[in-house]
Amino acid sequence: MPELSRFYGLVIKMFFGASEHNPPHFHVTYGEHVGVIDMATLTMEEGDLPARALTLVREWASIHRAELMEIWNTQTFRKIEPLP
């Protein structure tokens, strides 16, 4: 699973290929915590990310939502800038 971005201990990844399923989403790891984030709503569909980590992920994803959707739709990997 390619790594799209990394910041503040959060690692953002996205699966590629026919095995991926809708709705568009990405995966987050933070230490032993994980989460699956819906790109349309920025809700955590699965996982156990701490509230502060989820807030940072949502902030990052709201900035980069168009890039995330382009990556999902084209299945073309590229890195995305982390939060400063």
Image (cartoon, rainbow, N blue to C red):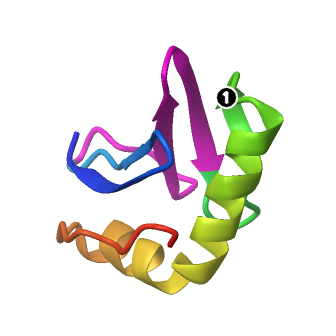
User: Which residue appears at 51% of the width and 79% of the height?
Assistant: 64
Residue 73's place in the image compared with 35, above or below, is below
- Left or right: residue 21 versus residue 5 is right
Residue tagged 1 = 46
Question: Viewer-proximal residue, 18 or 42?
Answer: 42
Q: Nearer the viewer, residue 6 or 72?
A: 6
Q: Which residues are magenta?
A: 18-37
Which percent across, then down, holds residue 57? 63, 55
Instruction: Please state if 29 lies on the left or on the right of 78 as rendered.
Output: right
Residue displayed at 59% across by 68% down? 61
Image spot of residue 9 (x, y percent): 46, 39
Is 49 situated left or right of 4 in this image? right
- Looking at this rendering, what residue extends furthest in the right direction? 51
Q: Amino acid at mark 1?
A: Glu
Residue 64 included in the magenta stretch of the image: no
Q: Which residue is pictured at 58% across the width and 38% down the height?
A: 36
Indicate yes or no whether the magenta region holds residue 27: yes
> In the image, residue 35 lies at what x, y percent?
59, 32
Q: Quadrant of the N terminus?
A: top left
- Residue at image position (37%, 67%) is 72
- In the displayed structure, would residue 30 be above or below residue 38? above
Q: Position of residue 59 (x, y in %)?
A: 69, 67
- Label 1: state its secondary structure: strand
34 w.r.t. 70: above or below:
above
